[in-house]
Amino acid sequence: MGSMEQTAGKSKQPVATWTLMAAALAITLLLPDWAGSGSPRSPWLLASPAVLGLAGAFLAARQDSPGWMVASGVWGIALIPALIFIVTLVGGP
């Protein structure tokens, strides 16, 4: 009966992973020059979605959520290429 209480009190929802995935998306949406000012973005901003996605994957792995671990890692790494693809489709080469 003690083990049921321990598992019931332990949350399996990877809220920290979801938060990092949302932050990675928000940072990715900040990368394009929406105003057309021509000012370059910081180079660290380009790497931050991947870092946040991998950090979320690490936190999901610690919570024993392998599905969210893979999803967060792929999400973080794929955001920049997806952004480049979408901007190229919309804006042209």
Image: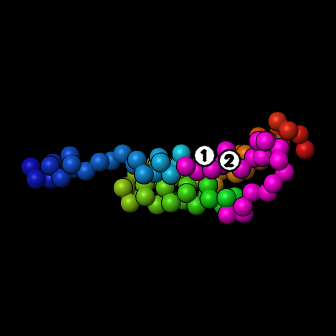
Quadrant location of the C terminus in the rendered image = top right
**On the image, numbered disc 2 is attached to which residue?**
30
Q: In the rendering, at what x and y percent does residue 63 appear?
A: 36, 55
Q: Nearer the viewer, residue 81 or 64?
A: 81
Q: Is residue 58 above or below residue 34?
A: below
| Range of magenta residues | 23-44
Residue where numbered disc 1 is placed:
26
Does residue 30 belong to the magenta stretch? yes
Residue 44 drawn at (x, y percent): 67, 63
Q: Amino acid at mark 1?
A: Ala
Colour scheme in use: rainbow
State whether residue 61 appears in this view. Answer: yes
Tell me, yes or no, whether the two marked residues, 2 and 1, touch with CB atoms within 8 Å. yes
Residue 53 screen position, x and y as percent = 55, 55
Q: Is residue 62 magenta?
A: no
Residue drawn at (43%, 58%), measured in percent from left and top?
Answer: 59
